[in-house]
Image: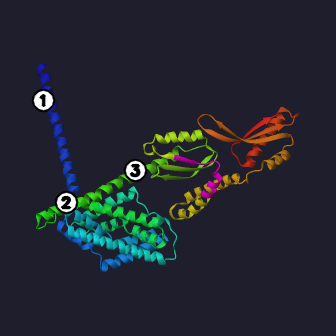
Amino acid sequence: MTETKNSGKPEKNTKDSELAENAKQIRQNAKSFFGALLDIRDDTDRDSTVEAVKKDISFKGHNAWILIFSIFVASIGLNVGSTAVVIGAMLISPLMGPIVGVGMAVATNDVDTLRRSFVNLGIMVGLSVLTASIYFFISPVKEENPELIARTYPTILDVLVAIFGGLALIVAKTKKGTIASVILGVAIATALMPPLCTVGYGLANGKWEFAIGALYLFSINAVFIALSTFVVVKLLGFPLVRYANSRRRKRIAQIASTIAIIVMIPSVILFVNLLKQQVFESKAKDFLKETVQYSGTETIKYNNNFQDRRIDVYLIGNTVPQGAIDTWRERMKEIEALKETELIVHQGSNQAQDMNKLSTELRSGILEDLYVKNQEVLEDRDKRIKLLESELSKYRGDAFSFVDLSKEAKINYENIAEIGYSNLITTNFDKTDTIPTFTVSWKTGLSNNQLKQQQEKFEEWMKLRLKLDTLAVKNVR
C-alpha cells in the first residue's frame, strides 16, 4: 500500500511540469507572433525618412500655389456648408510638412531643421489665413453655418484624432516606399485646413471669437501631430545630428529637450482639461435626462458651462416645487464630476419672458437641423414648439375663459347651480402633480341615478372641451 501512494506523486509532478512548460511555450509563441506582426524597425528607412520630411518642409513655388488653391476650395466648402468640398480640399493640401518637421527636428537635435520648420510653419499659417480672409471678405455669403461653428473649439475627440493621426502619418513616412493612401487619410482626419479657413472667416467678418477659437483648434492639432512624430522618431532610434563641437552638441540637445518638455507639459494639461470637460458634459446630459423630470413639466433647453461649473435648465408647464429642485441638487452632488456644479432652474414669474425668447431660439434652430439632423428630430422640435406656444397662450391670457366656459356648461347642463375651477397640487410622496379641478354644485330634486349620469356626462364633456387627459370633478349637492 505504501508503494502505491508514493508512486502517484512523481506522476502528478510530471503533469504539473508539462503544463508549466506548455504555458511557457504558448507565451513565447504569442510574444514571437505579435513581435513579428507589430515590429516596424526592420522595415524602417531612417535616411530616406529624414530626407523626405526635410523635402516637405519648404513652402515655395508649387507648394505655395497648391496651398493657396486648396485654401480657396476649403473656404468655398465651409461657406456653403459642403463637407465633400472641404474633404476634397484637404486631399490636395500640403499642410503636414512643417509640423512633422518640428517633431522630427526636436527628436534628433536638428536645430537647422527645427528653425526651418518653424519659419515655414509661420509662412504656411499666414498664407492660409490671408487667402481665406480675402475669400470671405469678397464672398456675398456672410452667415455662419454648422461647418464653420464646428471648427471653433477643440474637443477631446479632436485631440485623440490628432494623436493617432500623427502616429499613423509618421509611421507611414518611415516605411520603405511611401504609403500615399495613409498620408491622404491622415490629412483628412486631422483636419488642419478647415480651422485656418475659419480663422480667415472670423477676421474678414469681425467675429473674433471664431478666429481665436479656430486658431486654438489648429494649434492643438499641430502640437499633437508634432508630439506624435517626436515619440515615434525616438522609439525607432533615429540617429541624433552630430556636431563637430561636442559642447555645442550638448547645448543643442538641452535646447531640444527643453522645447520638447515645453510642448509636452501644456499639451498634457490641455488633454486632461478637455477630458474633464467631456466627462462633465456627458454626466450633465445623463443627469438632466434621468433626474430632472417632473410630471406636467417639459425641459425645452439646457446649457452646460464647464468653466463656471453651472447648469442652466429652462422648464415649461407645471411649476416645480422648491423641494423637488433641492432633491435634484442633492442627487447631483452624488455624481463625482458634478459635485461643485450649481444647478439653476428657470421658471416662475419670468417664465413667459423666457419662453418668448426660447420660442424664437427654437424656431431659428430648425435651420441648423436642416443641415445636421434627421426628420425625426425636426418633428420632435415641432412638437416642442407647439407645447411652448400652448404654454405661452396661458401667460398671454389666451387660455379658455372661465366665464365663457361656465356659460356653455349652463346651456348644456341646466341643473348646474354653481361651478368653480382651480389647480389642485397633489402628492403621493413619490411625485407631485398639478390637476385641473372643477367643483360643481347641482340643483336639488335630482334622483341619484340622474345625478350620476349628469356628473359622468359633464366630466367627459369637460375633458373633450379642454382637450385634457386628466382633470378632476368634485360634485356638491
What residue is shown at x 67% (from left), y 39% (from top)? 425
Could one spot residue 112 in this view of the protein?
yes
Residue 112 location, x and y as percent? 21, 70
Q: What stretch is highlighted in magenta?
A: 343-358
Q: What residue type is labelled 2?
A: Gln
- Tell me if mark 3 has few (under 14), some (14-19) or many (20+) residues whose alpha carbon lies within 10 angstroms of its own: some
Mark sitting earlier along the chain (3/2): 2
Reply yes or no: does residue 351 show up in magenta: yes
The label shown at residue 254 is 2
What residue is shown at x 44% (from left), y 63% (from top)? 152
Circle 2 SS class: helix
Which quadrant of the view contains residue 420? top right
Residue identified by numbered label 3: 276
Q: Which amino acid does label 1 sit on?
A: Pro
The label shown at residue 10 is 1
Mark sitting earlier along the chain (3/1): 1
Q: Tell me the mark number nearer the camera, choosing from 3 and 2.
A: 2
- Tell me if mark 2 has few (under 14), some (14-19) or many (20+) residues whose alpha carbon lies within 10 angstroms of its own: few
**Marks 1,2: beta carbons within 8 A:** no
